[in-house]
């Protein structure tokens, strides 16, 4: 082949490379960056492991050996994303602080709170967000000893007490569990009603479509119930 042909071939090859490089550069400015799969999210763990971690944390809390005391650590990392290992449906009672009860640092628990620790549509939406978009592997409904919302509902059901404001709506949400406990005539009605309210809301979450129930069935999410004893600090699974 002549020298001219070789030169033309070289120039054409360079032009093609230049055009290709410009095209790739343009595409890079338009297309989103490919997701990085090299490192799994910190909360990409089995539900059973998540449960073990928070219950171990509760053990530390009970024995006053809590590990999480420097809450300023990790602030920069938390500004980028959150990776909670569990979602807690907690009562609004001021004596119940899930992060302290389970000795977990900021960003490790996704907490929804309402007096009586029940699941309504708003709370369910928050939990759906947690499992669907944050990858939360564990949901816990957490009741507690001496719950005022449970005691008030018992009075409404048994004595016909009328509560003011929007409190009747709260009582209506708690009635299924409380009425089931009353029917059994237990020795300690408040304690039994607290446990039954937790169990009722666990069942609701386990069957809640369209997001939570399929994840539970697939073993990707676990739903459990617990009761926190304010005096001792201990959480017992129910």
Image (cartoon, rainbow, N blue to C red):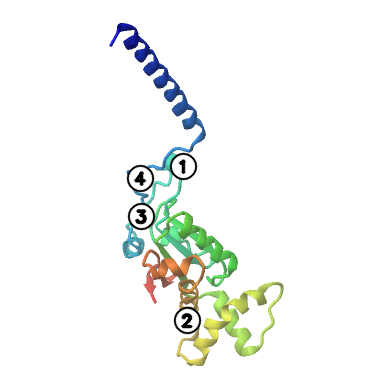
Task: Give residue 50's quadrant in the image.
Answer: bottom left
The residue shown at (47%, 92%) is 184
- Residue annotated with mark 4: 37
Contact check, label 1 and label 4, Cβ < 8 Å:
no
Q: Can you tell which of label 3 and label 1 is closer to the viewer?
A: 3
Residue 80's tag is 1
Q: Earlier in the sequence, mark 3 or mark 1?
A: 3
Specify whether 7 is left or right of 99: left
SS class, disc 2 = helix
Label 4 to label 2: alpha-carbon separation: 42 Å
Front residue of 33/113: it is: 33
Q: Residue 18, image x and y in percent?
A: 42, 19
Q: Of all residues shown, which one is farthest toward the right?
A: 165
Q: Which residue is mark 3?
A: 44
Residues at circles 2 and 3 in contact by the CB criterion of under 8 Å: no
Quarter placement of the C terminus: bottom left
């Amino acid at each position: 082949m002549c020298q001219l042909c070789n030169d033309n071939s070289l120039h054409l090859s360079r032009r093609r490379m230049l055009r290709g490089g410009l095209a790739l550069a343009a595409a890079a400015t338009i297309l989103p960056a490919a997701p990085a799969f090299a490192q799994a999210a910190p909360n990409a763990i089995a539900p059973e492991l998540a449960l073990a971690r928070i219950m171990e944390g509760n053990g530390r809390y009970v024995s006053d050996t809590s590990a999480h005391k420097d809450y300023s650590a990790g602030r920069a990392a938390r500004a980028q994303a959150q990776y909670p290992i569990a979602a807690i449906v907690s009562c609004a009672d001021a004596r119940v602080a899930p992060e302290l009860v389970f000795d977990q640092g900021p960003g490790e628990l996704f907490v929804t709170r309402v007096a009586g620790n029940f699941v309504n549509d708003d709370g369910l939406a928050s939990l759906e967000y947690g499992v669907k978009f944050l990858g939360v592997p564990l949901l816990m409904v957490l009741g507690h000893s001496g719950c005022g919302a449970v005691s008030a509902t018992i009075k409404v059901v048994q004595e016909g007490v009328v509560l003011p404001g929007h409190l009747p709506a709260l009582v209506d949400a708690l009635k299924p569990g409380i009425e089931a406990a009353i029917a059994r005539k237990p020795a300690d009605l408040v304690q039994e009603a607290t446990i039954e309210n937790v169990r009722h809301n666990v069942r609701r979450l386990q069957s809640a479509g369209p997001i939570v129930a399929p994840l539970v069935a697939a073993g990707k999410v676990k739903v459990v119930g617990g009761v926190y004893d304010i005096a001792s600090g201990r959480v017992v699974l129910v």
